[in-house]
Amino acid sequence: MNAAWVYVMVALLMAGWGPDGAYSMVAGFRFLGQLVGYSMLIVMAVTAVAMRAESLFTTDIVTSQGALPNAVYQPVGFLLFFLAAMAVCFLPPFDLPTAPGELAGGVEAEYTGARLAVMRLGRFVLVFTLATAVTVFYLGGWLGPVLPPWAWTLLKTLFVAAVMLFAGRYVPRLREEHLLAWGWKIGIPLALLNIFYVGVVLLLFGSPSSTSM
C-alpha cells in the first residue's frame, strides 16, 4: 500500500513545484512531511489487521471478521487508520496542502480548467480507494445479511467516503507542527500499543472464528 502512496507524494510535490509559486511550493512540501508521518500509521494499523487474519490476502482479512469486525475488535487501530487515511487524502481538518484560507488553494492555486478538474478527480479516486480499504480491513467488507456481497461493499464504502468528505469540515484545521507531532509522538505509540494488544489477545484466545456475519 505504501508503494502506491509514493505516486501520490510525487504527484502532489510536482503539482506544487511546477507552477513556481511560493504558496503552491510550500503546500507541496507540506504534503511530503505529512505523508511520511501518516504512512507509518497506515502500515502499522494494517499489520495488526494481518495478525488477526494470519494473512495479507484481503479475502482472508474479510473472512476473519465473520464473528466481529475489526472496527470493534481493535478500535484504536481503526481510528488511527481512518484518521491517517483522511490525512493522506488531505481532507479537512488535515487539508494543509490546500489550506484555502492560508495558502490560497496551495497545490491547486495555480491550476484552472481541465488541469484542476484532473487534480480534483484524482483526489476523489484516492478518497474512494481508501474508503474501500477501510471497508475491507475494518468493516467486514462484503459480509452482511440479506443483501448480496457487492451491495454491502458498495454501501459501506459510500458511507465511509461520505464521512471522510464531510465530517472534518466541522473541525478546526490543525497547524502543521501539531499535526506531525500528533502523528509521531501519539499516533505511532498508539499503533504499537494496538499491535501489542492484538498479539496478546491472539495469544490468549487464539484466532477468531470465521463464521459469517
Image: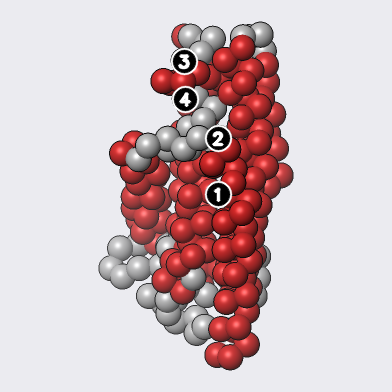
Secondary element at tag 2: helix
Residue tagged by mark 4? 99
Q: Disc 3 designates what residue?
A: 104
Give the mark nearest the N terminus, 3 or 4: 4
Kind of residue at badge 1: Trp
- Residue 176's tag is 2
Left/right of residue 62 with respect to residue 43 in the rendered view = left
First-in-chain label (4 vs 1):
4
Of label 2 and label 3, which has the lower sequence position? Answer: 3
- Element under disc 3: loop
Residues at marks 2 and 4, CA–CA distance in whole angstroms: 11 Å
Which kind of residue does numbered mark 4 sit on? Ala
Question: Does residue 68 appear to the left or right of 107 in the view shown?
Answer: left
Total number of numbered labels?
4
Residue corresponding to mark 1 = 182
Q: CA distance from mark 4 to mark 1?
A: 19 Å
Image depth: mark 4 or mark 1 in front: 1
Check the image and name the residue furthest to the left.
146
* Residue 149 vertical position relative to residue 21 in the rendered view, above or below: below
10 Å crowding of disc 2: few (<14), some (14-19), many (20+): some
Q: Residue at x 57, y 69 (%)?
A: 194
Q: Residues within 10 Å of mark 3 (few under 14, many from 20)?
A: some
| Tags 3 and 1 touching, CB below 8 Å | no
Query: Which quarter of the image is occupied by the C terminus?
Result: bottom left
